[in-house]
């Protein structure tokens, strides 16, 4: 769904181009390693650049994997990395459900 | 000297990175300081819209130059920044709004902008899903559009690095030293001092505090604006719809198929608070469905908030201050991303050559602030 942002050829293992880390946005291990190599060592920055963690799963699948990759590549302990900010609603909610909620409250 | 730069830029958003890009293209050695991470402030929180429908000659010409730059980014950067000429449609539900839009169109047309006032039926042709109950007509500009702020900033950063400029992330400016009325150096939270006779304040919602470090007052006050984004659905080319009514809002369908939008809260919410509220989620959903009823079947994915950096008259504040060599380019009033590319290009020319490519009188630092206008 989301376009891929391959700015330059990844220097990493070509096999990593076939490993999907973020299923919502179809982002591969190679793309994430490439972003870290470009200097994006902040989880929020990678999130914004590649939209990882901004899809329907809200980072439940990829969040820890990406934090681990940053820790591995930068040598920074994982607990020192600032986590991305969780955003409401925690699961996607159809607009008609949101509006029905309001109707019930106003009765 | 290692710590000597031609220009030091404070702020890693669209204004700082674009000015840095155009300065380094002119051979200037640039240092950009960002206290958090690139796009952490307002740029990364915007709803991606790029419009040229403004109401002063400075802002119209800046926005038109910006649109030209957005259109050529794919070629310049070597990658797609998700630019799309998806247009902006300003909706008029009252005679008063019709006359505001028609007056602005009369100001915009002489600059060559492709803007027209359409009837409600013509609006419906552009947006078949639009609910036109009570609609009189709308101001439509097809060359307005949208782009991805993160990718645009990446492109500018790539340009800065290519021209040997430096970017320091996580360094906050804590001091600006002045010698005999002229800026001399900046000191950061990392304990570093960098020398330059030219410093640009591109700190967005923090611009007032940064100016304060140089002993300057600029009237820029942040206000919270909340936003939300939906899941992606089939791209239907729904342009940015702007509804200025008290219960209106603005939203657009991104090229990714997602709907992204916000509304201006009444009363305003001063401060840099960027928390989300449940009230906004419900209210924005209601306002979107009112304009495009089919959206009731789309699911909201995320909501967040960002800061509009407001000035007394709703127009940016740019130029040199009474401290020689200390420049300001801030107070974009919610239009930083759309104006940013051209603002950066113009600032680069002003900083190096002391001239503006177009008259920027309405935006200049030190002006007398007039009344705030609808489309500024």
Image: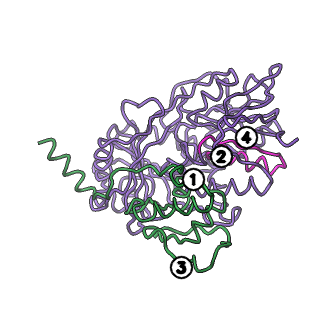
Chain colours: A green, B purple
**Residue A18 got which mark?**
3
Answer whether residue B17 is magenta in the image: yes
Question: What x and y, as percent, mark residue B126?
Answer: 42, 61
The chain holding disc 2 is B
The chain holding disc 4 is B
Answer whether residue B88 is magenta in the image: no
Left or right: residue B108 versus residue B96 is right
> What is the CA distance from the residue labelled 3 to the residue labelled 1?
24 Å
Residue placed under numbered mark 2 in the picture: B169
Question: What x and y, as percent, mark residue B89?
Answer: 45, 52
Q: What is the secondary structure assignment of the residue under circle 1?
A: loop
The chain holding disc 3 is A
Asked if marks 1 and 2 touch (Cβ < 8 Å), the reply is: yes
Given residues A66 and A51, the one toward you in this image is A66
Asked if marks 3 and 1 touch (Cβ < 8 Å), the reply is: no
> What is the CA distance from the residue labelled 2 to the residue labelled 4?
22 Å
Q: Are marks 4 and 1 on the same chain?
A: no
**Residue A70 got which mark?**
none
Q: What is the secondary structure assignment of the residue under circle 4?
A: helix
Residue placed under numbered mark 1 in the picture: A42
Residue placed under numbered mark 4 in the picture: B347
Mark 1: few/some/many CA within 10 Å (<14, 14-19, 20+)? some
The magenta segment: B13-36
Residue farthest right in this picture:
B1
Question: What x and y, as percent, mark residue B43?
Answer: 55, 46
> What is the CA distance from the residue labelled 4 to the residue labelled 1?
29 Å
Quadrant where the N terminus of chain B is found in the figure: top right
Left or right: residue B42 versus residue B112 is left
Q: Residue at x 40, y 57 (%)?
A: B259
């Amino acid at each position: 769904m989301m376009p891929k942002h391959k700015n330059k050829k990844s220097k990493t293992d070509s096999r990593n181009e076939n490993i999907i880390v973020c299923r919502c946005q179809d982002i591969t291990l190679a793309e994430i390693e490439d972003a870290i190599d470009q200097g994006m060592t902040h989880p929020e920055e990678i999130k914004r650049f590649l939209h990882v963690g901004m899809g329907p799963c809200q980072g439940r699948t990829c969040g820890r994997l990406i934090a681990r990759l940053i820790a591995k590549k930068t040598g920074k302990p994982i607990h020192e990395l600032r986590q991305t900010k969780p955003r409401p609603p925690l699961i996607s909610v159809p607009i008609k459900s949101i509006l029905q909620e309001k109707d019930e409250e106003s009765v | 000297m290692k710590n000597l730069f031609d220009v030091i830029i404070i702020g890693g958003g669209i204004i700082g990175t674009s000015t840095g890009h155009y300065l380094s293209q002119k051979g200037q050695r640039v240092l950009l300081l960002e206290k958090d991470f690139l796009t952490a402030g307002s740029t990364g929180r915007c709803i991606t819209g790029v419009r040229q429908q403004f109401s002063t000659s400075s802002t119209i010409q800046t926005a038109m130059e910006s649109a030209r730059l957005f259109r050529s980014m794919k070629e310049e950067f070597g990658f797609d920044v998700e630019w799309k000429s998806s247009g902006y449609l300003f909706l008029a539900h009252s005679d008063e709004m019709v006359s505001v839009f028609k007056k602005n169109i009369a100001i915009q047309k002489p600059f060559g902008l492709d803007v027209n006032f359409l009837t409600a039926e013509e609006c419906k042709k552009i947006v078949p899903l639009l609910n036109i109950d009570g609609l009189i007509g709308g101001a439509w500009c097809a060359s307005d559009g949208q782009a991805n702020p993160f990718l645009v900033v990446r492109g500018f950063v790539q340009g800065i690095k290519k021209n040997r400029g430096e970017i320091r992330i996580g360094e906050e400016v804590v001091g600006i030293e002045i010698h005999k009325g002229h800026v001399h150096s900046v000191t950061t939270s990392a304990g570093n001092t960098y020398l330059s006779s030219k410093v640009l304040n591109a700190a967005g919602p923090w611009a007032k505090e940064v100016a304060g470090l140089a002993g300057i007052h600029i009237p820029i006050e942040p206000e919270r604006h909340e936003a939300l984004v939906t899941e992606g659905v089939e791209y239907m080319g729904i342009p940015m719809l702007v509804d200025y009514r008290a219960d209106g809002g603005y939203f657009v369908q991104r090229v990714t198929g997602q709907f992204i939008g916000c509304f201006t809260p009444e009363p305003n919410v001063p401060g840099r608070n960027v928390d989300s509220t449940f009230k906004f989620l419900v209210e924005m959903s209601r306002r979107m469905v009112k304009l495009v009823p089919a959206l009731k079947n789309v699911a909201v994915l995320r909501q967040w908030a960002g800061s509009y950096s407001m000035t007394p008259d709703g127009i940016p504040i740019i130029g040199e201050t009474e401290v020689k060599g200390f420049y300001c380019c801030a107070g974009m009033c919610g239009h930083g991303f759309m104006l940013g590319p051209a603002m950066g290009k113009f600032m680069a020319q002003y900083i190096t050559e002391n001239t503006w490519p177009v008259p920027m009188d309405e935006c200049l630092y030190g002006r007398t602030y007039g009344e705030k206008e609808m489309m500024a």
